[in-house]
Image: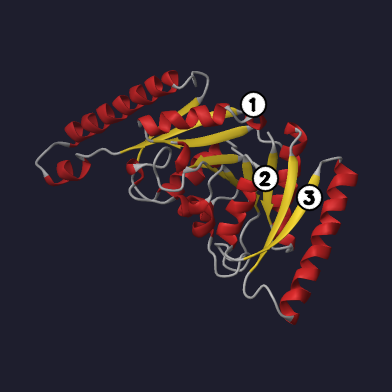
Amino acid sequence: MGSIVVGTDLSPRSDRGLLRAVSIAKATGSEIVLVTVLEGQATGPDARSERRSAEAALQQLQEAISEREGIACRHEVLNGDPADELNKAAEQAGAELMVIGPDRRGFFKDAFGAVTSERIIRSASIPLVVAKGSPWLSYRKILLPVDLSDSCKAKFKDLADMAWLEGTQMTLLYAYDAEGREMMGRALVTVKERAAYLDDCMKSAQNALHDFAKAVGQDQALLYAEEAKGPVWTTVARVAQETESDLIVVTPSGKGFVGRYFLGSTTEDVIRSSLIDVLVLPNSKV
């Protein structure tokens, strides 16, 4: 992997993203590009003072990473819209991954000025890691909510190209929709008939998930097929805890992993609620 762009606002919470990037860079031999984006005017006494402070802080981080970790590192201080500038920096660096730290209050309003996590995540043109878990441990177990679509299958090729995920245990979570549940609750059907219908739905979902796993070369993955009864983040959070996962993989628009079977829940819901790192794969690679 060529380089990793790390978006930072130079706050202590941003350090978690930096530490995760260092861990991945060590495993892949990648260069780290530290990027801070200043909003507002690019000229004037205040702007010059802010830039000098940012340059000094990034220079210290760069030296620490290079000297202590033995990792190639450089930095950039940019002006403009943080989401746009992070993408430009990634493109110019030929980066294959972007990493940002956790938010301060649910999203990234404070960490990147007026820009929310949704703005950054939806505009990312390369895979992006939101570092929310412990940055000290390597990824061992990955949770992938899947919708069994062709676009979802295509995402597994993207994952296969990520050498830093080699050797991890994958869990595929398929939240299916028992479409007749509500209708049967209103109809004159017996409890036994209703139970038999729901049992058939579960078996069908399990078989479909098994076939999907085989088709994407994940025969050894753990398989969870569960009826979608509420917000996706509650199911994802519970399964992540049950499987002791340390990384969740999603896409920003709900096409590929978090799909229509998740009752309209969004990637932002998963990221907001997650206690572990989240890898967001861009739609451009579908």
Q: Earlier in the sequence, mark 1 or mark 3?
A: 3
Q: Pointers 3 and 2 in contact (CB under 8 A)?
A: no
- The scheme the figure's colours follow is secondary structure
Name the one closer to the observer, 233 or 190: 233
x 41%, y 37%: residue = 256
Specify the amino acid type for callout 2: Ala
The answer to which quarter of the image holds residue 59 is bottom right
Quick one: label 2, few (<14), some, or many (20+) residues within 10 Å? some
Q: Is residue 280 above or below residue 118?
A: above
- Residue located farthest toward the left when viewing the structure as drawn: 188
- Residue located farthest toward the right when viewing the structure as drawn: 67
x 74%, y 37%: residue = 30
Q: Position of residue 159 (x, y in %)?
A: 55, 31
Q: Earlier in the sequence, mark 3 or mark 2?
A: 3
x 86%, y 40%: residue = 70
Q: Which mark is residue 166?
A: 1
Name the one closer to the observer, 150 or 148: 150
Specify the amino acid type for callout 3: Arg
Name the one closer to the observer, 46 or 66: 46
User: In what element is the residue under mark 3?
Assistant: strand
Q: Pointers 1 and 2 in contact (CB under 8 A)?
A: no
Quick one: label 1, few (<14), some, or many (20+) residues within 10 Å? few
Camera-side mark, 1 or 2: 2
Q: Which residue is mark 3?
A: 74
Using residue 278 as the reference point, say whether residue 164 is left or right of it: right
Q: Pointers 1 and 3 in contact (CB under 8 A)?
A: no
Using residue 68 as the reference point, say whether residue 240 is left or right of it: left
Q: Position of residue 208 (x, y in %)?
A: 34, 24
